[in-house]
Image: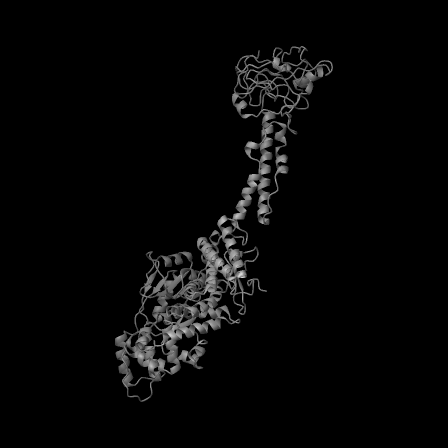
Amino acid sequence: MDLTHPAGGADDGPVRAVELVTGDFLLTINPVDGSGIESCPPGRRPIVPRRGPAGASPQPPSPTALLERDEDRQRLRRMLARGGSVHLAGAPGSGRTALLDAVARDCADLAPDGVIHLSGRGRTPTDLRHAIYAAVHHTPAHRPGPTELAAALRQIGAVVVIDDIAFGGAALDDLFDATPECAFLITADADVPLPVAEGRLEAFEPDGLSRTASLELLELAIGRPLDETETDWAADLWFETEGLPLRFTQAAGLLRHREPGAVAPLPDAATLTATLVRALPEGAREILRYAVALGGDVPGPERLPALTGYPAAADDHAVLVAAGLLSAAGAGHRLAPGTLPELLAAGLGEGSADRLLAVAQHYTWWLGGAELATGAVTAETEPLLAAIDLARRAGHDAAVAALARAAAPRLAAGPRWSAWERALDAGLEAAGTAEEEAQQAYFRHERGVLAITQGRLDRARTELTASTALRDSLGDVSGAVAGRRALALVEDIGSGRAATPADGVPTVGLPAGLLTAAAAATTARLPATSDTPPAGTEAATQAIPRHASAAAPAPRAPAAARRRNAVVAAAGTALLAVLGTVVAFGLTGGSEDPEPDDGGNTVPAGVEDEATTEDETTPAEERERTEPEADESPAAPPSAPETTPEEEATTEEPEREPDSGPTRETTPDAPETSGGPGTPPTEEQTTPPENEETPPNTGQPPPSEDTPPPTTPGEDGGGEDGAPGGGPGGGPGGGDDNGGDADGSTNVGASPTSTGDPTATGDPTATASESPGQPVV
């Protein structure tokens, strides 16, 4: 199966259900139970190749020969080559359509994407945008979303020829803005406003044909020279019509059907059309009656034999085109400009209500056939919509409801969704008047599905709820299930679990809201800053693996969401690891005093004193060598480091062992114990016997062979910041020049050891002084 046709494709003809990718949705057009819609699964978006540059105009050739138009064609081509847009003005019947066809052929090699020739009759700005896109891209089963459509239109460079455009003003300005690389050549009726922006569209109005050119056109059309009577008549006609080519085409049709040697006078311009109609065969006149009943639209030649009852109706259709009574309009034809009032005056509007009913019934039968290509329905869109609208006005509600039900799925598979919407609206109104609840339920369901694709969730919810209620009351189980599925999609979109077409999600079928929810869930599972254990404790070194292992498993998400969760989690873990390492280095290498050891503080693994080398020995290590064994003489307990009030407010108190004594309260004047940083004190050092007297300590280790000589201020023994100080960790005297700590506090009365501090012996009754700057009593 072709990858561009997920379910047979919109151009494959005999299919009952068609899958169409529209934006971020997969639409299954089901004419029985109603269309189904869901988020398009990944990989189901069809491949959209570009077509080759458009060459010749797809419009039917005009029967009118172009005379005295060479200069106009060259001028229009130069204007379009400069990248400007042109409004081809002129009265109806002045030959604008024939001139458009000629200019389109002249500009075939002017732009990279060639020429795009469209009919603007009955088409909205959105219809024309999609038509321009489809003219350059092969999209039989794909209708791009707004974001994709806008991006593709900006890359299209073509000459866009639009005949009989139905809108102007700001809407036309928006169309120009959406296609900045395109040049437009358009025609419009006199009541269509020009663009609001100045200079966006240049008007060009061709002159009428001269008298000589008008007579030449008449002779070319009939294939013979004019006699004297016909020449005089043609001269009068030129004066009355101001050289309109359409009138001379109709005059040629009259002369072709006029019997040779007829003595009846030739008509003037006012009665020309009526005289021509009387000269036509009956089959052609019947076609005109159906055209009048449809408001000027004409069914295709294939539909005419069954409608009119004339087997040769297709040939009569060609006769009407050659006579100038039918003009090209898109892929079909309609009455020539200004002809409808004259035909009504000629009495061809009698019996229009019956003919409308016949047209509605014929189209209902034709659309119900299985082997019907979408392209054939597209060519019949205008007369089909005219039959729906006018038959409803004529009171044929049941027939209109049946026709709209048959036409809706076919129009949904076509390029013009404005026609689909018009059929649904008219069918719902007709079904309500005819009191057909099953038809109402179908039309409401389809209107709700269409509203989903348009991003109108409130309307979609209302229509689908009403449709489901009607189908429940009628016992239509399958239809009610289809409605509830569509309602579930509406709720998912409203809650952010699915994507709308205006979101522009590049991954089809993967809702954008799911990615956002997955990222939020991952962020919530990461440890918060306030939950991080204090730096410098054993818990801080284990924070990262503990949080990583204790994180609860997230709900299973799509592959893309899981990959994003892994990336976010890895980034958070790496960030915490870096922060923990930086804090650990700051605590061990940049602190002047060791952390208080109460059994729960350990130096992080892998952190060493940068100032300690193999050839140096810290005072604590030297004291351990000279002091007796643990069972003979216990070491002096280390004193608590000095901290500032700010550090006391921000640092969390370390955990205590179950058998440790009361927590010591630290003051700025707490005595210190000299000990090299990075050397964790032992249990004997932290809990000495209460009654054993601590030997005095002068703050300097005993002489030793391995002990380096003391240094004076200003030498290499200074602190890390270059200030004169003691040991590698900035012991007593390290920090600033005034003998204070590195954090700015001053050691008043501090000594390496204190023999009179009751808190150092672990006495539970002892209390530390809370007055900064006073020794502990």
705 and 597: which one is in front?
597
Q: Where is residue 581 in the image (x, y as percent from the top left)?
A: 60, 31
Where, quadrant-wise, is the N terminus in this rendering? Answer: bottom right
How did the renderer colour the structure?
Answer: one colour
In the image, residue 755 above or below residue 505: above
Say if residue 152 shows up in the picture. Answer: no
* Image: 715 above or below 382: above
Q: Where is residue 64 in the image (x, y as percent from the top left)?
A: 37, 75
In this view, the residue in front, 649 or 593, is 649
Nearer the observer, 371 or 231: 371
Displayed quadrant of residue 724? top right
Residue at x 55% of width, y 33% of height: 529
Q: Quadrant of the C terminus?
A: top right
Q: In the picture shown, does residue 500 fall above or below 138? A: above
Apparent side of residue 88 relative to residue 398 in the rendered image (left or right):
left
Residue 510 position within the rendered picture, expressed as x and y whole percent measured from the top left: 55, 52
- Decide: is 588 above or below 161: above
Give the tally of numbered discs.
0
Q: Position of residue 30 (x, y in %)?
A: 52, 63
- Whether residue 689 appears in this view of the structure is yes
> Would you say 119 lies left or right of 542 here?
left
Q: Is residue 707 left or right of residue 775?
A: right
Residue at (50% x, 56% y) in the render: 23
